[in-house]
Amino acid sequence: MQPDLSGATWHKSSLSGNGASCVEVAITEEVVAVRDTKNRAGGMLMFRPDEWEAFIGGVRLGEFDL
């Protein structure tokens, strides 16, 4: 079942400035949704909150640095 994101607030990183090559994130109790700012109607990725926390934790620890 698809969560209702019609009232969700989408956020873009302040570090992205006015760039068009960004992603936006909406966080609800049920899901964290991520979409492309260039194609907002093109679909989104959805994660459980615990999955998103694990991802953010990995980013902070540098697990994805090249």
Image (tube, rainbow, N blue to C red):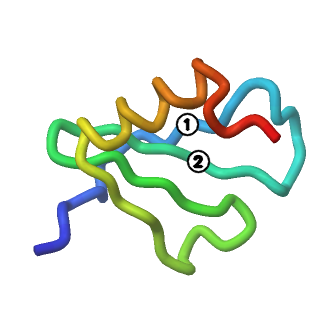
Q: In front here: 50 or 27?
A: 50
Image quadrant in which the C terminus is located? top right
Task: Please provide percent x and percent y for residue 5.
Answer: 29, 56
Q: Is residue 46 left or right of residue 18?
A: left
* Amino acid type, residue under disc 1 in the picture: His
Q: Which residue is mark 2?
A: 24
Element carrying mark 2: strand
Is there CB contact under 8 Å for labels 2 and 1? yes
Q: Give the residue at x 65% y 51%.
A: 23
* Amino acid type, residue under disc 2 in the picture: Glu
Task: Please provide percent x and percent y for residue 52.
Answer: 37, 39
Separation of disc 2 and disc 1 at Cα?
A: 5 Å
Q: Give the residue at x 75% y 51%.
A: 22
Task: Please provide percent x and percent y for residue 59.
Answer: 59, 29
Residue at the far top in the pictured view:
61
| Quarter-of-image position of residue 17 | top right
Q: Is residue 25 left or right of residue 5?
A: right
Q: Residues within 10 Å of mark 2 (few under 14, many from 20)?
A: some
Q: Is residue 30 left or right of residue 20?
A: left
Q: Which residue is mark 1?
A: 11
Q: Give the residue at x 17% y 37%.
A: 29
Residue at the far left in the pictured view:
1
Up-down relation of residue 49 to residue 4 (above or below): above
Circle nearer the N terminus (2, 1): 1
Q: Residues within 10 Å of mark 1 (few under 14, many from 20)?
A: few
Task: Please provide percent x and percent y for residue 63.
Answer: 61, 32
Mark drawn on residue 3: none
